[in-house]
Amino acid sequence: MSDNKDEKIEDVLVDSELAKKLVPNKFKFTSQQGRARRQKLLAGAKKLSETQAINDITLAAVCEEAGIPRASAYHFFPNIEAIFLALRFLNAIEILEMVETVDIGNYDRWQGYLTALIDQCVTIFHNDETKAKLIYDTNTPDFEGDEFGEDMDHQIVDLVYKRLSERYEMPNFEDIQNTLLIAYSIVNAIFTLSYRRHQNITEDYIQEANTAFIAYLRCYLPEKLPRKNR
């Protein structure tokens, strides 16, 4: 776990509401030792998830893997679900960062840009299979179902809309961002089906996700959006 990602966990803990899910008390560790221990716990949970079902991993097992006393672990995370919630939150941040790096200027049409985003997401999952497992496997800690997961989904969609608006003259209707959110949910649903059937996001399902994503948005967006003059 890099220092950069640990700093993001620190930012998460500043939010008192989310902190209630991640730590038992309203405080955060800023000491080098505290940061290192949190990193070890997150890295230990991630390593165990490479070979075990996430719902089979216990806090005791993570503590043993990380070499952290269980009593100390409770200062950082009240339970195993909170550890995986933190990892899942970081996964969402990585997707946000990916969206920021894809240059919409390289694509003449909105379809090419959105397809590139899906391809980049898949690359993230293929480079680290634990990310797909944590998002799409069965019996994993709830993330989409709580307000923080929904907030991350909205942040991703808002950023995509912002990029599209910078490049194209977007249609002016009230629910366009909700339309993008539904399209994003369609992709996630197809990826979930692929992972639960094949323990992977396969090429066939990637194609299905692209097809469904673009087909749905074509109901609301013209085939070719006018590009903004620069």
Image (tube, rainbow, N blue to C red):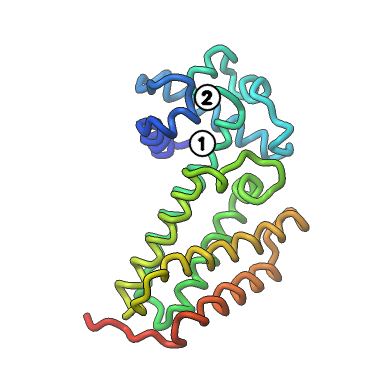
Q: Position of residue 4 (x, y in %)?
A: 39, 39
* Residue at mark 1: 86
Q: Answer yes or no: do the residues labelled 1 and 2 have beta carbons within 8 Å? A: yes
Residue farthest front in this picture: 174
SS at mark 2? loop
Image-based side of 129 in relation to 51, left or right: left
Q: Position of residue 189 (x, y in %)?
A: 64, 61
Q: Position of residue 112 (x, y in %)?
A: 48, 78
The disc labelled 2 sits on which kind of residue?
A: Phe
**Mark identifier at residue 1:** none
Task: Judge whether 204 appears above or below 4 on screen.
Answer: below
Q: Reading the chain from its start, which is encountered first: label 1 or label 2?
A: 2
Q: CA distance from mark 1 to mark 2?
A: 9 Å
Q: Position of residue 214 (x, y in %)?
A: 54, 77
Quarter of the figure with residue 56: top right
Quadrant of the rendering where the C terminus is positioned? bottom left
Image-based side of 145 in relation to 61, left or right: left
Task: Judge whether 148 appears above or below 11 on screen.
Answer: below
Mark 2 Cα within 10 Å, few/some/many (few <14, many 20+)? many
SS at mark 1? helix
Task: Judge whether 66 appears above or below 214 on screen.
Answer: above
Quarter of the figure with residue 208: bottom right
Q: How many marks?
A: 2
Mark 1 Cα within 10 Å, few/some/many (few <14, many 20+)? many
* Residue at mark 2: 77
Residue drawn at x 60%, y 36% as measured from the top left: 46
Residue drawn at x 61%, y 77% as measured from the top left: 211
Residue drawn at x 55%, y 26% as measured from the top left: 41
